[in-house]
Amino acid sequence: MKRLLLSSILGLAMATTAQAATVTVTVKDTRYQTVTGFGAACCDGAMCPFGTDTNPVKLLYGPTSKIGLNIMRMEISPNFVGDVVVPEWNNYDTPYDWKGSLPSAKIVKQRGGIVFGTPWSPPGEYKTNGSAQGGNADDQGNIRAELREDCYGKFFPWLNTFLAYMKKNGVNVDAVSIQNEPDWWVNYSGCLYTPEQQLKLVKENAHMLDRETYPGVRLISAEPLGFDPKYSNKLLNDTTARKYIDIIAGHLYGHPPLGNMRSANTAASKYGKEVWMTEHSVSDNIQNRLPTWHEQLLFAEELNECMLSGCTGYIYWYMRAHWAFVSTGEAKYGAENKVKNRLLPRAFVMSHFSKYVTGSTRLATTPTMNPNTQEAPKEYSAYVKDDTTLIVMAIDTTKTAYDMKLKLPFYVKSGKHILSTGNETDSLCQERPITIDMPTKELVVKMPARSLNTYIFTIDPGAAAINEVAEKQEKKATVVAYYDLHGRRLDSPRGLCVERMSDGSSKVVYMKD
């Protein structure tokens, strides 16, 4: 008897332990930014042979690709390495190295994507050190490499020559930036600007960006290393400069999204400007291995926190690197990277956002994150697209599985769950149906341990309409007063009288005494 009792107690305890804990996430129809998209950079380096290998963009870009990227960043570079002219560039139609990104840019545009250019440096002859080099090198004598003030008037006409070259060669560029990392003193191609110098450049000269010849081209602010809001705030607080800037941009090195980026978005959203994170490489310092699954989840959290910070565009660093989206073919980084031009796990992590969040509008969610929290154990965000699709993103970095109770602002009638739980191919982007018996605003879904989850629901507007009618029927009008035919209120109904209803209507009735 005691053994049976003990067995029952142990069985009950095990069942209780096995039952998943429940978290509740409430989504509200409070709308924030509309997301333009996601992308990566097509630049020299890991993209070699530069200009000839278009496999990365073919794998990554377009709505029918497995990843769904739609924004490509390229360099607007002068033809200098220090002061040395690279001989093969002499055959180009332009004195600057813009040809290398053309083949990839054409494919991105053909697939409906966005292409924008960023200068690492304006032409060396425009600068204080006479070189495209950033100035922080022995051969430069540590001269602060800046755009000479007497050349401010040449800067935007120079950008126009880039736009002209790209258009001539079949690519209508969608946007140009002012400068890559204006606050980072480098020994490679670079140029320094203070916030005040950028303001003067834009305020007095940005009118020369030729928007008539290149309609639709947008101007992106300089892209500071850690998304320092002093750069964007200077522009946005000036009424003249503000009208020229379309997109506020920056990078995340040393400053996670919920800090400087969210601060920069405060002013940007006030004036209706987009906010793009235009470069970051997550865990690029790892040697001789691919990122772990935990590191992939931290990348997913960075994407999610950018969305929570008001980001409308997220552009990763290199497309191809062992810590990025497409393999380099170097066996030393692991089996997945051994064959060149294969999709890596990080690309599929990105696809949770790029394939489903692009074009959607972010909704409010609770619980909300602590403003000072980075890399929280569990994170959430939610989006609505075309008022037909509701998307909920959930990331769990813990070893505990959860049941997630969703309280939604709309009735949903069907759904699917996109689930990633590890670096292995069969653990990435698994698609599972979500069974919904009848339209509902509340349901429970699974959130496995150490997982990235995208829940996609079809909104049922008919259910909302039917429910509204039902609610009105439940609230039937009641009699609040009686009047005789002369309009005098009666203490009790009698004879021919008028009923006044709670919904404001009235009718004549005959009441027997």
Image (cartoon, helix red, strand yellow):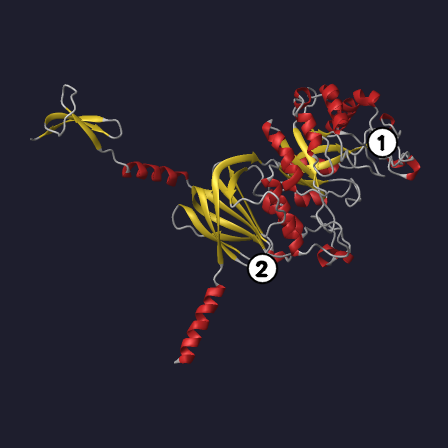
Q: Residue at x 47, y 62 (%)?
A: 19
**Quadrant of the frame with the C terminus:** top left
Marks 1 and 2, how far apart in space?
50 Å
240, 5: nearer the viewer: 5
- Percent x, y for residue 261? 65, 37
Please provide percent x and percent y for residue 226: 72, 39
Which element is circle 2 on? loop
Please say whether residue 117 is visible from this viewpoint: yes
At label 1, which amino acid type do we have? Ala
Residue 324 vs 491, above or below: the answer is below
Residue 9 shown left or right of residue 137 in the figure: left
502 left or right, relative to 433: left
Say which amino acid is labelled 2. Answer: Lys
Residue at image location 68% in from the left, 19% down from the top? 240
Q: Up-down: is 509 above or below 312?
A: above
Label 1 close to label 2 by CB (< 8 Å): no
The residue under label 1 is 145
Q: Is residue 66 visible?
A: no
Image quadrant in which the N terminus is located: bottom left
Residue bearing the label numbered 2: 399
354 or 364, which is in the foreground? 364
Q: Nearer the viewer, residue 443 or 329?
A: 443
**Residue 391 - label:** none
Q: Nearer the viewer, residue 380 or 5?
A: 5
N-terminal of the pair, mark 1 or mark 2, is: 1
Residue sitting at 35 percent across and 40 percent down? 467
Measuring from the top left, give residue 478's x and y in whole percent: 22, 33
